[in-house]
Image (tube, rainbow, N blue to C red):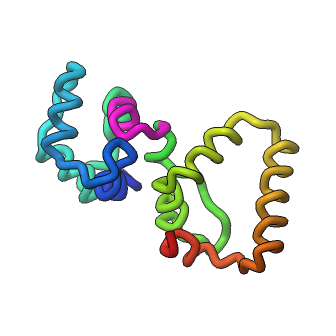
Amino acid sequence: MSGLNMLFESSARSGRPITQAQLADAVIARGHSLSWAHISQLRGGIRTNPSAELVSLLADFFNVDEEFFFPPANEPGVPDSTLLAGLTNASLRRLLLRVVELSDASTGLVVEMAEHLRDKEKLLMRPERIFRQR
C-alpha cells in the first residue's frame, strides 16, 4: 500500500514511529483480525489489495483519509513519493482538508494564491526538494 511505510515512520498520532504491534492491537480492538505478518506484507508490497474495512481502520488509526492509500495520478515529473511526503506535513494536511470539496474554480484560486506566494518569496517550483527541506 503506497504511503503506509511513511505513516509508520512519522505518524500524525504521536510524532514518532508507530510499531506494527501498536497498529495490530488497535485494529484488533476494533474487532478486525490483523497480524503483524499481514502488516509486514502490506508494507512490503506483497499484499496489495486490503479489504475496504481494513483500509478504513488504517485511515482512522493514522488519521488520514482512505484515499491517502490510493493516490491519484500526479503532476507530470513529480514522483508519488514526493506528494505523499507532503501529507505528513501538518500545515499542508490542514490546507488540503480545507480545499477538499471546493469547486474547481475555488481550487484554482487556491493554487493561484499559492503560486503567487511562491513568486513573492522567490521560490522556484522544485517539488522534489520541497518536502526534504521541512
Q: Going 12% across and 44% down the picture, which residue do you hit?
A: 36
Residue 49: image x %, image y %? 34, 43
Residue 60 counted in the magenta span: yes
| Main secondary structure found in the magenta portion | helix
Q: Going 62% across and 40% down the picture, which residue do you hit?
A: 97
Q: Is residue 128 left or right of residue 39?
A: right
Asked if residue 63 is positioned above or below residue 82 in the image, the reply reads above
| Farthest residue, direction top | 31
Residue 65: image x %, image y %? 49, 37
How many labels were placed on the picture?
0
Q: Is residue 88 left or right of residue 119?
A: left
Q: Going 34% across and 56% down the picture, which residue do you hit?
A: 10
Tell me which segment is drawn in magenta. Answer: 56-65
Q: Is residue 44 left or right of residue 68?
A: left
Viewer-nearest residue: 4 or 53? 4
Asked if residue 134 is positioned above or below residue 73 in the image, the reply reads below
| Farthest residue, direction front | 121
Residue 100 counted in the magenta span: no
Asked if residue 61 is positioned above or below residue 94 in the image, the reply reads above
Viewer-nearest residue: 73 or 20? 20
Residue 55: image x %, image y %? 37, 35
Q: Going 49% across and 58% down the picture, which residue do you hit?
A: 84
**Residue 74 falls in which quadrant of the image?**
bottom right
